[in-house]
Amino acid sequence: MLYNEYEEYKRLFSVDCTIFGYEEDKLKLLFFKRRIEPCKGKWSLLGGWVRKNEASEDAAQRVLLDLTGLDNVFQEQVYTFSKPDRDPGGEVLTVEYYALIKIDNRINEIVEKNGASWFELNQLPELIFDHNELIERALDKIRKKANNELFGKHLLPEKFTITNLRQLYNEIFQTRFDPGNFRKKVLSLGVLEKLDEKDMSESRKGAFYYRFKENKELTYTMPIFKRAININN
């Protein structure tokens, strides 16, 4: 019998999805109780096997659809994790994706039905395998993205105040941006449209709502906030 390298070097292939949501001024991550051994019942990122004749990005979308009921979730690839001992169940190569979801009552009903829960960044549960490393990789990815384009279109409601946007940035970078400098910088980018409507809950005068301009390029050649924003630690 001829030696078959295709059989010799086969490994299990999976996807893991780091799912971010934003609710009540908090950036959150979605976890579920693992349904198979090893570590059955422990908190885990959402994941699944890549099926035969399926691309990893299609598998990630399928996994997200199964849990959230949404088929148009924004996602991007993060990293490929391939250490042979990362999963005690066997040699598993996984491609990580991050996804951004606007949390609402419908999403929460589906998430609860599937035994999943949202956790704030500073209140994460104990996770299986190397999932803490996956989260750090995903956070690094969205922080770089948020510093190279105005971030929030897939997390904020359609209309929002500059304060809402700044609070999202505070959560992403786990710091506090100076309100005046932040406002000046983001408005100078020309990608937000001011609406003739106010949120009266922020102050007696109210705060104007904004929305992202349609078909407006959001990416810049230089980091948006490099030496442009004073940060109050």
Image (cartoon, helix red, strand yellow):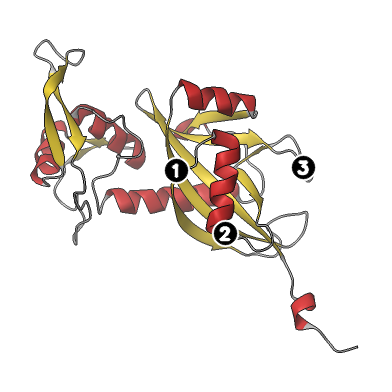
Q: Which mark is residue 36?
A: 3
Quarter holding the C terminus is top left
Q: Count numbered badges in the picture.
A: 3
Real-space Cα distance between discs 3 and 2? 21 Å
- Whether residues under marks 3 and 2 lie with C-beta atoms below 8 angstroms apart, the answer is no
The answer to whether residue 132 shows anywhere in this view is no
Q: Nearer the viewer, residue 214 or 86?
A: 214
Q: Type of residue at label 2?
A: Ser
Is 99 situated above or below 49?
A: above
Does 86 sit left or right of 160 as displayed?
A: right
- For the residue carrying disc 1, how many other residues have a C-alpha within 10 Å: few (<14), some (14-19), or many (20+)? few
Does 110 sit left or right of 43 as displayed?
A: left
Which residue is at 54% across, 34% downward? 68
Residue position marked by numbered label 1 in the rendering = 72
Point out the frontmost of discs 3 and 2: 2
Q: Type of residue at label 1?
A: Asn
Which residue is at 69% across, 62% downward? 52
Point out the frontmost of discs 1 and 3: 1
**In which quarter of the view is residue 185 placed?**
top left
Q: Which type of secondary structure does the marked residue at label 3 adopt?
A: loop
- For the residue carrying disc 3, how many other residues have a C-alpha within 10 Å: few (<14), some (14-19), or many (20+)? few
Residue position marked by numbered label 2 in the rendering = 56
